[in-house]
Amino acid sequence: MPTATVSLPKYCDILVIGAGAAGLFASTWAGRAARAAGRPISILAVDGAKKLGAKILVAGGGRCNVTHWRVTEADYAGGTPPAIRKVLGRFTVDDTVQFFRACGVEFKREDTGKLFPTTDSARTVLDALVAAATRAGATLEHPARVEAIERAGTGFLVATSVGPIEAGRVILCTGGKSLPKSGSDGAGFAIATSLGHSLTAPIVPALVPLVVPGEHWIRGLSGLTLRAEMVLLAPTGKRLRSFTGSTLCTHTGLSGPAVLDVSRHWLVERERDRGVRLAINWLPGTSADAVDKLLQGAASRGPLAVLREHLPERLVRQLCELAGAAVAGDVPRDVRRRLVQCVTGLELDIVGDRGFTVAEATAGGVPLAEVRLETMESRVCPGLFFAGEVLDVDGRIGGFNFQWAWASGYVAGSAAAAGRGDSQTS
């Protein structure tokens, strides 16, 4: 039913659908570009959520990891590296820092390279974005959920939960399907396809914890955290991807940066080939031969005494049990080899993931091939622009998805306001 506090105009020049990170940024730069060109236009950003910026507020444990000190196309998956590089180059990390600094937000760089606001509060970031969009002349309305959209002459007729509105141009910033309670429940994908776009396949959770069987021994180590390497293997045993970083054993399986980073690759590859496998090296950077020599060199002490100098004792006991190795005394050669494999290349029994309700991002979306990279305008539907996670681009953990939102939002907002249309090439 219509919400009394929300009243939409009959028409706006630019309608931004979704007022999250990408949407607020696109609104800001659309307003700034219009003013710089001396072309007053009306910009309206609508969002279906009761509270704006839910994903911003929970990002980085409530501190909001705004970006990373060094961002390249290699930090992303989905669209092709050259295409991603082209968009990222339009609005760099330095540009991001300067933008927020002008808004009164300073950053600090942590050892991981992540940039956080010095306040350690995501609210600082959200307030700055809302204020910037408002100062630029954009009107923000919520909750106002877009239910359908169709072409109407050279513009669009949009049906929302609070009534219809006509728009000259539309910027789609709805996000993907991750954290649906925040509003990114996949509705943007339906809007894109209704206007003629396709979607990549598969569309799966990204940056999501992985699940092991109910009685798996890893569940018994819940709370244990250590640095490990996650390795994605082809059916032939070839290493396809690897990520090293903090790894957390949980009551459902595995989480932590290394696991989150590998998750989208595991899920996508499993959709294509059920024979792919996921393995873990509990001692990243240490080869099987090195561990074998370590065990041989201190055979009299036993594997527990040797390995607990490098790994948590609880984990060592589980690995010994898995390999059938006694924790003390000499270990037969074949058992020792099994133990070495458990330490440096243990194949994991992954039965699923925690799903979109927990995932921090979405893998898949509108293909970049259907978008003009210089403007982020649709090649299929002139006047429609894209920014953020609705596109087939997802970054690893560390602020990379936010940087994509800033870069694509900047390009889309600036181009939409300038009226740069389907004559542009990319």
Image (tube, grey):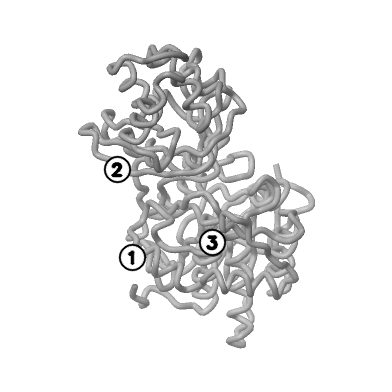
Does the image show residue 319?
no
Q: What residue did someone put label 2 on?
A: 240
Amino acid on which disc 1 is placed:
Pro
Amino acid on which disc 3 is placed:
Gln
Relative placement, left or right, of 31 versus 257 is right
> The N terminus appears in which quarter of the rendering?
top right
Q: What residue did someone put label 3 on?
A: 403
Q: Quadrant of residue 289?
A: top left
- Where in the figure is residue 347, as x and y percent of width and height? 36, 26
Closer to the camera, 219 or 82?
219
> The C terminus appears in which quarter of the rendering?
bottom left
Q: Nearer the viewer, mark 1 or mark 2?
A: 2
Task: Give the Cα separation between the discs numbered 3 and 2.
Answer: 26 Å
Crowding at dot 3, Cα within 10 Å, few <14 / some 14-19 / many 20+, comes out as many
Q: Residue furthest right?
A: 5
Task: Give the Cα separation between the discs numbered 1 and 2.
Answer: 20 Å
Please give the label number shown on residue 82.
1
- Where in the figure is residue 310, as x and y percent of width and height? 50, 33
Q: Nearer the viewer, mark 3 or mark 2?
A: 2
Residue 21 against residue 43 in the figure, above or below: above
Q: Is the residue under label 2 in contact with that under label 3 (CB below 8 Å)? A: no
- Where in the figure is residue 242, as x and y percent of width and height? 37, 43
Crowding at dot 1, Cα within 10 Å, few <14 / some 14-19 / many 20+, comes out as few
What residue do we see at 45% from left, 60% from top?
A: 151
Closer to the camera, 60 or 163?
60
